[in-house]
Image (spheres, rainbow, N blue to C red):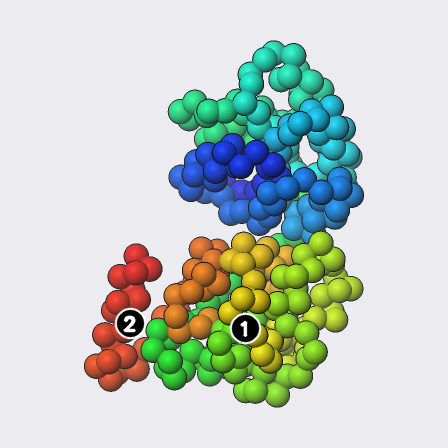
């Protein structure tokens, strides 16, 4: 099965928890995880931005309204395959879901192998949809477990070097919200930051994105950390992952500078990063901290 990107629009929290636990064991990347069901137009806008391969949706309290939503999703220019999730396996409900355009119907609790089989079938159809899929950037994450190890310097240098190639389009994202040194290192000024992107996920499109980023060097866009941020205002890990998923469709490389601590934002990024560079110096305390971090990451 080829790796798939998925979106979750699930109001039923026990059902959502069961599905999330099952997805851990299959090659998927969650790009949108939304507990409640807002307006259909808002959700379709998010789906258009994040372009998942698969949408998992439950039937909620109003199945007929949800079937209408499924039909509207299937009418999108680049629709995901829809997998309807429900606590019942009544034939009439399954038939209604298929008539609405669902590719799969998953009855909960899940039978062993049911999720994998459904995703296998969806994956087999995916090549026909690849022509309209955006190419995804590689996400390279830089982490120095002991502060002052040089991760920010290396992240900036790698981003600048990659940006010199005219064929590359590079984003440098500062997710070290504790220090936020990328803006200082590159003299990149912006009134907005990664936090603004996380707080306005429903507005993320090309136009809004251009207002968020600043131009650091030729071929390089910079998404800075906020100038000042209290711990209570920090974004959720799932929000950061959604922003990076959006950025993947716009760049060839996304370079991420992470905080020295393995906080929830760093761990969220590390879940999706294609490569992780753990930076250490030769001093014994730095090597000791790096060893502990490797053990924790493993």
* Residue that appears at 74% across and 71% down: 211
Residue 46: assigned label:
none
Q: Farthest top residue?
A: 91
* Residue that appears at 42% across and 78% down: 151
Can you give x and y, in whole percent of width and height, for residue 64 in the image?
Answer: 73, 23
* Foreground of the two, 176 or 163: 176
Q: Quadrant of the C terminus?
A: bottom left
Q: Is residue 297 visible?
A: yes
Instruction: Mark 1: give few (<14), some (14-19) or many (20+) Cα within 10 Å.
Output: few
Can you give x and y, in whole percent of width and height, for residue 147 in the image?
Answer: 37, 80
Horizontally, is 126 left or right of 213 in the view? left
Above-or-below relation of 228 to 58: below
Could you say whether the residue bearing mark 1 is in a helix, strand or loop? loop
Q: Is residue 132 visible?
A: no
* Residue that appears at 66% across and 67% down: 196
Above-or-below relation of 115 to 193: above
Instruction: Mark 2: give few (<14), some (14-19) or many (20+) Cα within 10 Å.
Output: many
Q: Which mark is nearer the camera, 2 or 1? A: 1
Horizontally, is 254 left or right of 116 in the view? right
Answer with mark 2 or mark 1, whichever residue precedes in sequence: 1
* Foreground of the two, 101 or 220: 101
Can you give x and y, in whole percent of width and height, for residue 231 in the image?
Answer: 51, 69
Residue 290: assigned label:
2
Could you say whether the residue bearing mark 2 is in a helix, strand or loop? helix
Q: CA distance from mark 2 to mark 1?
A: 27 Å
* Foreground of the two, 273 or 168: 273
The reply to whether dot 2 and dot 1 touch (C-beta < 8 Å) is: no
* Residue that appears at 50% across and 24% down: 108
Can you give x and y, in whole percent of width and height, for residue 248 in the image?
Answer: 60, 59
Residue 230: assigned label:
1
């Amino acid at each position: 099965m080829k790796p798939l990107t998925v979106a979750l629009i699930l109001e039923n929290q026990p059902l959502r928890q069961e599905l999330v636990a099952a997805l851990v064991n299959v090659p998927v990347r969650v790009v949108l995880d939304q507990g409640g069901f807002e307006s259909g137009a808002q959700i379709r806008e998010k789906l258009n931005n994040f372009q998942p391969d698969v949408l998992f949706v439950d039937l909620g309290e109003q199945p007929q309204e949800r079937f209408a939503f499924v039909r509207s999703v299937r009418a999108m220019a680049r629709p995901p395959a829809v997998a309807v999730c429900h606590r019942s396996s009544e034939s009439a409900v399954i038939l209604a879901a298929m008539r609405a355009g669902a590719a799969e119907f998953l009855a909960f609790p899940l039978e062993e192998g049911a999720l994998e089989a459904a995703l296998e079938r969806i994956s087999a159809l995916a090549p026909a949809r690849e022509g309209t899929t955006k190419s995804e950037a590689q996400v390279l994450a830089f982490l120095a477990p002991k502060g002052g190890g040089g991760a920010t310097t290396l992240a900036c240098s790698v981003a600048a070097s990659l940006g010199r190639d005219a064929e590359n389009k590079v984003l440098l994202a500062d997710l070290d919200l504790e220090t936020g040194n990328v803006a200082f290192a590159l003299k990149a000024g912006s009134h907005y930051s990664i936090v603004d992107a996380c707080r306005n996920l429903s507005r993320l499109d090309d136009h809004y994105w251009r207002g968020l980023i600043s131009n650091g060097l030729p071929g390089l866009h910079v998404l800075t950390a906020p100038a000042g941020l209290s711990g209570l205002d920090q974004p959720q890990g799932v929000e950061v992952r959604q922003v990076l998923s959006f950025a993947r469709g716009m760049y060839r490389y996304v370079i991420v500078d992470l905080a020295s601590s393995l906080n929830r934002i760093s761990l969220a990024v590390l879940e999706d990063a294609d490569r992780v560079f753990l930076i250490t110096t030769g001093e014994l305390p730095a090597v000791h901290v790096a060893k502990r971090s490797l053990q924790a990451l493993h």
